[in-house]
Amino acid sequence: MPSKDTYWLEISVSVDGEAAEAVSAILEQYAYQGGVVIEQMGDLNDPDPLALEPEIVVKIYVPDYEDTSERRRKIDEALYYLGRLYPVSEPRYRQIVDEDWSTTWRKNYKPFQIGRRVWIQPSWLEAENVDDDDLVITLDPGMAFGTGLHPSTRMCIEAMEELIQPGLSILDIGTGSGILAIAAVGFGAQRVLALDTDRIAVRTARENVKNNHVLEHIELFQGSLDSLGPSKWDIVVVNILAPVIVGLIQGDLLSYLSTTGRVIMSGIIDEQVNGVQNALAKAGGEVTRKLTTRDWVALVAKQKAPYPG
């Protein structure tokens, strides 16, 4: 346990939303008590739902006795290789003296915003400075399977904000942390079914659903869409990867939509959009909206209306 005379090393990295979760996962393994601080640097007053997305700083704190040249080298190397895939700044190292950084890193953690009115915050914070119609979701930092930082999740939230009306039914395929299922309830959905093939993801989602006090509104189970059986939903959300989405479309994904239903598909790189759209057209669907954030795309689609006669 660090003493009061311990100095702490602050390690910070500037990233965008696409890289934030990956950088957090790298730094978490070196952080004291696994604590990762995420700070949005954008303008909170900007009405653009994506205004805060590009500017994020990820920070961790390391006690002096763990500040070694070997540790710094490993961090530098891991971030260097990640930087070949994402825009990631070089890590900044700064020494800090404080009485008790075992808890102070939590004090530095700030909630972050997704879309127009969704706020993500850790369990130890009380909601402050939020409007009456804002939706606060509790997710602790370091949580695997989706924290809302990635553009694909943000675009799902944006589409859900517009589409979900009170009383609708929602199917969340590949729920991960459960963030989209929890948001669906907050937007007014009456029935939500969330599934994932990963056992740990389902366990994580169940814990998050419980922490957000929506356990009675969300049904969770481990399995694939094939194991669900025939059913109709007002909105189906699929935030996975393009090849998986194509496979689901070819496996009759649209049959799970109600007559006026919509499917939100995200996790698509722009060069993969045509493949998804072609599969959708062959299955009898059509795109009604396209959302983009840099090279990431989300599609909203419906079943084509049958020709009269």
Image (spheres, grey):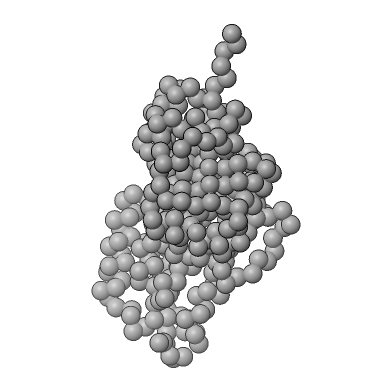
**Which quarter of the rendering shows the N terminus?**
bottom left
Residue sitting nearer the eye, 83 or 141: 141
Most distant residue in the left direction: 70
Residue depicted at x 41% and y 26%? 279
Is 108 positioned to the left or the right of 221 in the image?
Answer: right
Question: Which of the 4 quarters of the picture holds residue 124?
Answer: bottom right
- How far across and how far down the image is residue 249, in percent? 42, 31
Residue 307 seen in the current view: yes
Q: Position of 162 compared to 37: left or right?
A: right
Residue 255 higher or lower than 169, as above or below: above
Q: Residue at x 38, y 62 (%)?
A: 25
Q: Position of residue 283 (x, y in %)?
A: 44, 24
* Residue located at (47% from left, 81% from top): 102
Front-most of 181 and 111?
Answer: 181
Whether residue 148 can be seen here = no
Q: How many marks?
A: 0
Using the image, determine if residue 287 lies above or below residue 40.
above
Identify the residue at horizontal 35%, vertical 71% (top origin): 30
**Given the current orientation, which residue lies at the most extreme right position?**
132
In percent of width and height, residue 86 lies at 37, 50
* Image quadrant containing the C terminus: top right
Q: Position of residue 104 (x, y in %)?
A: 52, 79
The one nearer the camera, 140 or 174, is 174
Q: Examine the rendered structure and indicate whether residue 145 appears above or below residue 290.
A: below
Residue that extends furthest to the top in the rendered view of this protein: 309
